[in-house]
């Protein structure tokens, strides 16, 4: 059986996106709701890669927007399992922003999402 720490490390998920004008607000920065959607998707992928079971989001914990994300930048979303319960787990997602023509990279957003493993009847089941 694979060790828990190995499974966590193997399930770390990284997704890169370019920030185009269709995802920005009137300040030319990434919509907060769009950032949260991206984060939930990466968290879902991370939870599923860890458990290899059907997972659903049950809550999003504190999401901190530390730095605006301007259009014309690249973002990297990184998801990692931070807590394991019997039927649930938590995934922290960080968004890093980098200029397209520079190596400068800064953490812009952090949030945590809780997922529950479910069966075919949508009832909570143990994470294997």
Image (spheres, grey):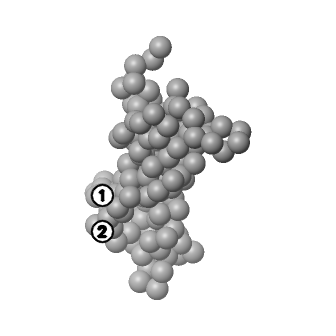
Q: Is 101 left or right of 21, judged from the image as shown?
A: left
Q: Residue at 36% of width from left, 26% of height from top?
A: 5
| Number of the label disc, if any, that sits on residue 67 | 2
The disc, 1 or 2, on the residue closer to the chain's N-terminal end is 2
- The one nearer the camera, 74 or 78, is 78
Residue 78 appears in the figure? no
Image coordinates for residue 106, horizontal then vertical, percent: 28, 58
Image coordinates for residue 120, horizontal then vertical, percent: 71, 39
Image coordinates for residue 12, horizontal then vertical, percent: 43, 37
Q: Circle 2 — which element?
A: loop
Are discs 1 and 2 less than 8 Å apart at CB? yes
Which residue is labeled 1 in the image?
107
Q: Residue at 44% of width from left, 41% of height from top?
A: 89
- The one nearer the camera, 72 or 116, is 116
Q: Residue at 70% of width from left, 42% of height from top?
A: 121
Q: Is 22 left or right of 106, judged from the image as shown?
A: right
């Amino acid at each position: 059986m694979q060790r828990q720490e190995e499974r966590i490390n193997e399930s770390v998920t990284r997704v890169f996106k370019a920030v185009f004008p269709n995802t920005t607000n009137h300040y030319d920065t990434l919509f907060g709701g769009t950032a949260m959607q991206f984060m939930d998707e990466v968290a879902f992928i991370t939870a599923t890669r860890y458990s290899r079971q059907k997972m659903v989001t049950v809550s999003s914990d504190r999401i901190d927007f530390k730095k605006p994300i301007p259009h014309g930048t690249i973002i990297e979303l990184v998801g990692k399992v931070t807590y394991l319960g019997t039927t649930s787990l938590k995934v922290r997602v960080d968004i890093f922003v980098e200029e397209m023509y520079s190596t400068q990279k800064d953490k812009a957003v952090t949030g945590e999402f809780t997922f529950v493993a479910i069966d075919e009847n949508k009832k909570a089941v143990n994470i294997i």
